[in-house]
Amino acid sequence: MSAKKHVVILGGGVGGLEAATQLSHNSKVRITLIDQNAVHIWKPVLHELASGTIGPKGNLFAFNELAKRFGFSFIQSTLDTIDSTTKTLNLENGQVLNYDLLIVALGACANDFGTPGAKENCLFLNTLADANVIHDRFRSLIERAQLTNKPVNLSIVGGGATGVQLAAELCQAIDSTPGLGPSARKRLLKPTLIEAQPRLLPPFPEQVSAEAQAELEKLGFDVITNGMVSEVGCGYIALKDGRRIESDFPIWAAGVKACAATSLLKNLELSRSGQIMVTDTLQTTKDPSIYAIGDCARMEVNPTAPTAQAARQEGRYVGRVAIPRQLTGKQPVPFVYNDRGAVVALGRYNAWGMWPSKKGFGGHGLGAQLARFIHEGLFRQHQMGISGIFRTICAALGERFRPNNPDLNGKETPIENKGK
């Protein structure tokens, strides 16, 4: 019997973990997953963790437990160097691994577009650690505002899904805190949302954009469109049209780019934004033994959007279709992305969706309920795939009957990035 092929996966996000779970059913491979974190997170809930409207229980999944459940090896580390000629990885912790096939699923990081002062003065929301920092900072500022009667000048740069959802969740956190509520929110928070494009949520229909903006304005947001940020300073955000916005809580949610680790893959072709160029089989253009999926990859033709939906489909394709065919000497069939639409939920206030036809729905009545149901269903589907039906049902019922009400008056336990 021939030895099992060693498949190494760099990154345990949505795409990387999906590839690992799919490959776990293949008896011809052994799998090693490498991630710098001890836990996996469904990235679309980061804004809820940051605000405190949901807690870590049931939303963080220890890689060590997942490794036992699905039969792969897990190493908590980061990539140091790679030699694609000898198929050797050197990790930051000193370990050296040889691979037969490599899946790069390193995700993306925030893109400040070189804006002066953004990196030094803004908070970002791309990782669990980022969510923890925002969570602690927000609580501290709200506590200070209660003592000084001076509102928190919140400024969110970026009117895409992350920006508008985070905006609503921060409002909901105040509304849900015992002793505070909507009246206190109006007194404690002076929020601004800045979007460089002519409207919020550019991928969605114009009606959805208009309704989402109206909803945020009802929550007290000053929504600025066509707002190009020229500088972020200590206590202010400057726009190119000369406006200067006072801000003691600036959050940058204006875009993503490939993480810096992709630059370590020196023999691969990279896009201008640092993404790894791949063919229609998600194999890199320079080395067919290396796959790249998710936000760190870019297809030469018909590139997919940087979404969890796309990353999950790509991970499933690589683990279930491409690699099994490659191991039997067959050419992988091309990857076909199945656009299932998109949803955006503004906390408990409102929700919208967009069908694959690009037609929008939601904003009120049953449409909003449907959008919110789909929004939660996407996470539950992912949760079920890695935790099983029973645990998913228990988690859903627990959140339904024992919701996590953020206490912005007290001292909460930080969201931890620890395995069990």
Image: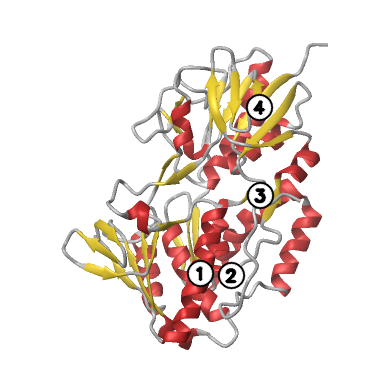
Reading the image, the residue beneath label 3 is 382
Q: Residues within 10 Å of mark 4 (few under 14, many from 20)?
A: few
First-in-chain label (1 vs 4):
4
Reading the image, the residue beneath label 2 is 53
Dot label at residue 360: none
Reading the image, the residue beneath label 1 is 169
Q: Nearer the viewer, mark 4 or mark 2?
A: 4
Determine whether label 3 and label 1 are within 8 Å by CB: no
Residue 96 x %, y %? 65, 23
Q: Secondary structure at mark 1?
A: helix
What's the residue at 83%, 11% (across, down)? 1
What's the residue at 52%, 38% (across, down)? 294
Name the one closer to the observer, 350 or 119: 119
What's the residue at 26%, 69% (across, down)? 245
Q: Secondary structure at mark 2?
A: loop
Determine whether label 1 and label 2 are within 8 Å by CB: yes
First-in-chain label (3 vs 1):
1
Q: Amino acid at mark 3?
A: His
Which corner quadrant of the image does residue 179 belong to? bottom right
Dot label at residue 95: 4
Q: Left of 94 or right of it: where is 266?
A: left
Q: Amino acid at mark 1?
A: Glu
Residue 243 x %, y %? 19, 67
Residue 259 x %, y %? 46, 39
What's the residue at 55%, 57% (across, down)? 46
Q: Secondary structure at mark 4?
A: loop
